[in-house]
């Protein structure tokens, strides 16, 4: 990429899904351009280690393809899950994604949801609909990229906002 153009990845996940969004930003033209979106949902029939391996491979492929300056990965919410097994699986997923991202040359941010929401949307306790509304006003093209068949994919919206957070972490606007 050129000297004024950088890419940033945002990663949102659950125990059986991963959404990765890559934004390419040109400092001379502040409009974000979605370069690529990867979304994978893993079937319940796959064991946890198969899912973690596939997520690791997906993160590695995205990092290799886009060579982002910074990757922002949502951190697991400590104490939010009443089910200890789910909390462990989310932490394992975060670890697999961070390990894959760590193989590249990108900076890695593990970001609490309240932190990226406060930075990007303006309120750390923003609801899912607040995040979509903010993105629709500030970056309507990004909402289009997060939509399929007229339905907005919240995982992709969150990944896009995490990519915006990654951009802001190096002094970008957005």
Image: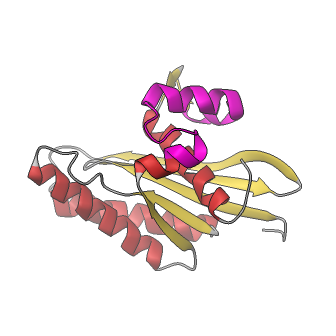
Q: Main secondary structure of the magenta part?
A: helix
Q: Residue furthest top?
A: 150
The number of numbered badges drawn on the structure is: 0
User: Is residue 122 on the magenta stretch?
Assistant: yes
Rendered residue at 84%/71% (across/down): 3
Residue 107 as seen in the image, left or right of residue 124: right
Q: Nearer the viewer, residue 16 or 31?
A: 31
- Where residue 103 appears, x then y in whole percent? 46, 80
User: Is residue 119 on the magenta stretch?
Assistant: yes
Q: Quadrant of residue 169?
A: bottom right
Q: Is residue 114 visible?
A: yes
Q: Nearer the viewer, residue 162 or 127?
A: 127
Q: How is the image coloured?
A: secondary structure
Q: Nearer the viewer, residue 160 or 148?
A: 160
Eyeballing the image, is 140 above or below 93?
above
- Where residue 146 appears, x then y in whole percent? 55, 35
Eyeballing the image, is 137 above or below 115?
above
- Where residue 14 appears, x then y in whole percent? 30, 47
Residue 36 as seen in the image, left or right of residue 158: right
Q: Is residue 19 visible?
A: no
Instruction: State which region is magenta.
Output: 117-146
- Where residue 113 appears, x then y in whole percent? 42, 48
Q: Nearer the viewer, residue 119 or 135?
A: 119
Q: Quadrant of residue 133?
A: top right
Q: Quadrant of the N terminus?
A: bottom right
Rendered residue at 29%/51% (across/down): 77
């Amino acid at each position: 990429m050129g000297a004024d153009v950088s890419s940033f990845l945002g990663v949102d996940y659950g125990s059986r899904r991963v959404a990765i969004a890559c934004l390419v930003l040109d400092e001379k033209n502040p409009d974000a351009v979605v370069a690529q979106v990867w979304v994978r949902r893993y079937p319940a029939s796959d064991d946890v280690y198969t899912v973690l391996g596939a997520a690791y491979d997906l993160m590695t492929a995205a990092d290799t393809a886009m060579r982002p300056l910074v990757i922002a990965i949502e951190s697991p919410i400590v104490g939010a899950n009443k089910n200890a097994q789910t909390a462990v699986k989310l932490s394992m997923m975060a670890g697999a994604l961070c390990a894959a991202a760590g193989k590249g040359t990108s900076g890695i941010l593990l970001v609490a949801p309240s932190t990226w929401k406060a930075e990007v949307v303006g309120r750390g306790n923003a609801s899912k609909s607040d995040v979509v509304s903010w993105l629709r006003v500030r970056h309507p093209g990004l909402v289009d990229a997060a939509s399929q068949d007229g339905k907005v994919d919240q995982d992709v919206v969150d990944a896009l906002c995490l990519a915006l957070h990654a951009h802001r972490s190096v002094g970008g606007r957005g």
